Amino acid sequence: MHHFQYQDGRLCAEDVPLEKIAKEVGTPCYVYSHATLSHHFKVFDGAFDEVPHLTCYSVKACSNIAIIRLFAKMGGGVDIVSGGELFRALKAGVPSQKIVFSGVGKTKEEMRMALKVGILMFNVESEAELFALNQVAKEMNKIAPIALRVNPDVDPKTHPYISTGLKKNKFGIDISIAKQLYLKANELSNINVIGIDCHIGSQLTTLSPFLDALERVKRLYKELVAKGLDLKYLDLGGGLGIPYHEEEPPHPTEYAKAIMEAAKDLHCTLIFEPGRVIVGNAGILLTKVLYLKQNQEKNFVIVDAAMNDLARPSLYDAYHEIFPVKKEARDTFVADVVGPICESGDFLAKDRKMPKVEAGELLAVMSAGAYGFSMSSNYNSRPRAAEVLVKGDEYFIIRERESYEDLVKLEKIPAWME
Ligand code: LLP
């Protein structure tokens, strides 16, 4: 359920007409709905109410500090993958004891930052990283709490670029050697083994890969407990999919029911790292039609948003619904919706059957809340879009549109060129 609906023929975010936001903030612009964000968080987190758990929102999905703050205020923790995300989480007010740190390439500097503030745990992804962390912790006279991220070799049946739990992927530690590494980790002076972690991919639309992975991880969990390890946390990562088009992913309550049933014989706190399922359908990208163009083959709708604003269609061939903000009876046509960037891969939709739109009108690119702004760039020297949070009949700019000055702010002309 989301709060982007037509009211009197005009698409609104909650009770704010998108036309008003476009007029006052400009386009392209990301618009998020507070009611949708909080509802999604509550539904996911609440689905696990019966068991000890912590919902650690995956910051990479949408990293604005106002959005992180919103979930922190609802009791959420965060999953981070960089020093930058740690900085954001702390700035947003996330308690350090609710932060889990994932990622295959944590630098020593990032480890130091996280050890200094005392995060809940590091999800360690290789033997080399484990030894590096032990070393850094030793130098700081700290103990690093860890889980190993195991790779259960399960096919998540999603796009290859966003599947992570297969042997051929770079992520995690092969489950067949994880036990030995756990025992090694347990001997290290400045490491405290407290959990097991696994994340198999993103935009999963069926439960079975989650349950297959959990079965494998459970086996390991039990073996380790039998060896005397005190495992307090089982982190099952994120990955639950959302409907973009015709997908019918399981509802979070269905997911929770199945996981809780499968994990009921484990005596630990469950951790989840949802990203997309919380923010994906809580945000749209608002854009304006600049021109219509036709050649012998195709119709093109040229808009002011581009692949630098929303990379998913170009990168994964992802499907995002596109709706005109003004709803009226009109003919349809088949068109490519494209941006102004000088790449043929710059499109938001291909061969899309859509209402015959006109130059100057506004379009909403739906389901853009996750991996939208957070993956945007300045390619073609395009200032990044503004981000707006709507709450009821009010809206708040939570990130200003970048200026041309911002584009060159960090650049320098060497003195010898002057
Ligand atoms: N935990 C870990 C360790 C992750 O790597 C990810 C996502 C998540 C949690 C959150 O997954 P989610 O619940 O959002 O599926 N840019 C791609 C998605 C990349 C996902 C990366 N990892 C896209 O736009 O589809």
Image (cartoon, rainbow, N blue to C red):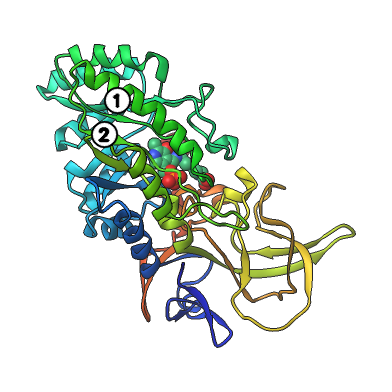
**Depth check: 341 or 345 in front?**
345
Q: Quadrant of residue 100?
A: top left
Residue at the image position 30 percent from the left and 54 percent from the top: 45
**Relative to 15, is 415 above or below?**
above
Q: Which residue is mark 2?
A: 266
The percent coordinates of residue 242 (x first, y second) are: 51, 54
The percent coordinates of residue 360 (x first, y second) are: 65, 76
The percent coordinates of residue 18 (x first, y second) are: 50, 76
Q: Residue furthest right?
A: 296
**Depth check: 381 or 370 in front?**
370
Residue 86 placement, left or right of 10: left
Q: Which residue is mark 1?
A: 221
Residue at the image position 22 percent from the left and 15 percent from the top: 227
Q: Secondary structure at mark 1?
A: helix
Whichever of labels 1 and 2 marks the residue nearer the N terminus, that label is: 1
Indicate the amino acid at tag 2.
Answer: Leu
**Which of labels 1 and 2 is toward the front?**
2
